[in-house]
Amino acid sequence: MIIEEGSTRPISDAVVEVDRQQGLTDNSGRVQFNRLRLGNKTFSAYKNGYSRVEAKAVNSLGTTNVKPVKLKVIGVSFSIDVKNWLSGEAIKDATIAFKDQKSTTG
């Protein structure tokens, strides 16, 4: 199971790679692979806005249970252009707010 570090919230649509196979986690943070060879495995998990993590597991007969893997939130960066829709000119001193973050255009 892939979860968010600091919580027990599962991360959906995280990419998990093992033995040249790739899968996406479901809404419960789980992914399933078929036809993996038995033995020690190293897998990686990542998603945009989160850290990339490598973990180890032993694949044995039957279901292989792996301890929850925690991805750290690292955020994403984006730019926003605030313009007057009639003139197309930039609007100065506009405040943009998202959750608890604010920024002002220059």
Image (cartoon, helix red, strand yellow):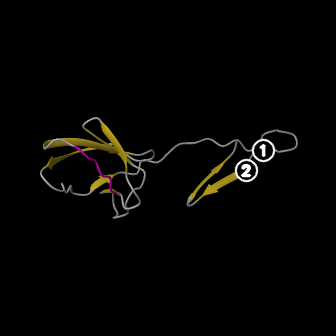
Residue drawn at point x = 78 percent, y = 44 percent: 91
- Of 88 and 41, nearer the camera is 41
Callouts 2 and 1 close, C-beta under 8 Å: yes
Q: Which residue is mark 2?
A: 94
**In the rendered image of this protein, does residue 86 appear above or below residue 20?**
below
Instruction: Tell me which secondary structure the magenta stretch mostly adopts.
Output: loop
Q: Quadrant of the C terminus?
A: top right
Give left or right: position of 21 versus 39. right
Q: Amino acid at mark 2?
A: Ala
- The quarter of the displayed image where residue 2 is located: bottom left
Q: Is residue 59 left or right of residue 45?
A: left
- Residue 102 seen in the current view: yes
Residue 8 picture location, percent across and down: 33, 64
In the image, taking residue 40 as reference, residue 94 lies left or right, namely right
In the rendered structure, which amino acid carries the disc numbered 1? Ile
**Where's residue 79, x and y in %?**
62, 41
Going by the picture, which residue comes out furthest to the front? 35
Percent of width and height locating residue 76:
50, 45
Circle on res. 91 = 1
Q: CA distance from mark 2 to mark 1?
A: 6 Å
